[in-house]
Amino acid sequence: MSSARRPLKVLDDLPQDRQEDNGGGTDIAISYSDDAEAAWLRKGNRAYYSYTIHAATDSRDGFVLGGHATPANRSDTEEYVAVLDEVDAKAGESIFADKGYSSQLNRYVLKVRGFADGIMHKAARNRELTPLGTFANRQISSVREKVERAFGALKRGY
């Protein structure tokens, strides 16, 4: 989600008391009119000043169950447990997520809490995804299609 308040440098002339002469110089205050909570992120050749939304949605209807926004430069893997804590999920349920949340720690958290692992598999650097990982991703994608509709609606509206 892109932030409309990109940082701009603002120079303000500060009013001076006419009775005091401090050498004839002008006082200038420099401030930045940016959204302090947003951050820069580069995707390909474009830079974005934005946020990332980490949200949990119902896989049946696509309703948003919980989540939060972070600066765009925060990694998805670091926010997975926080989103999981915001949702009232019961042990035994499947928790689906895209490749951005794929990490050994997140898979371990799902296992310890008794959830079925629905995190898409990600290939290791300079390696292809295994056939089993590809098959699992296809199965997960068929469920996540409904979830992605909610994110599409958010992007169209904002």
Image (cartoon, rainbow, N blue to C red):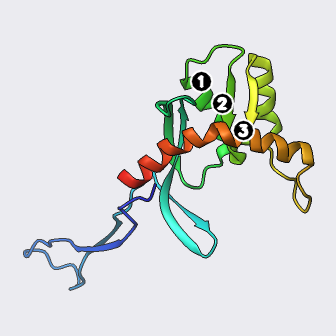
Q: Residue at x 36, y 51 (%)?
A: 157
Whether the residues at callouts 2 and 1 have beta carbons within 8 Å, the answer is: yes
Q: Residue at x 42, y 47 (%)?
A: 154
Q: Depth check: 49 or 45 in front?
A: 45
How many residues crowd mark 3 within 10 Å: few (<14), some (14–19), many (20+)? many
Q: Residue at x 91, y 48 (%)?
A: 131
Q: Depth check: 156 or 19 in front?
A: 156
Q: Residue at x 55, y 39 (%)?
A: 146
Report if residue 98 is visible in the image: yes
Residue 85's disc is: 1
Which percent across, then down, holds residue 153? 42, 47
Residue 67's disc is: none
| Disc number lying in front (3 or 2) | 3
Q: Which residue has dot 3 on it?
A: 140
Which percent across, then down, holds residue 133? 86, 44
Which percent across, then down, holds residue 62? 50, 34
* First in residue order: circle 3 vs circle 2: 2
Report if residue 79 is visible in the image: no
Question: From the viewer's perspective, is residue 16 above or below residue 80?
Answer: below
Which percent across, then down, holds residue 126? 90, 63
How many residues crowd mark 2 within 10 Å: few (<14), some (14–19), many (20+)? some
The amino acid type of the residue labelled 2 equals Val
* First in residue order: circle 1 vs circle 3: 1
How many residues crowd mark 1 within 10 Å: few (<14), some (14–19), many (20+)? few
Q: Which residue has dot 2 on it?
A: 81
Direction from residue 134 to residue 57 in the image, left or right: left
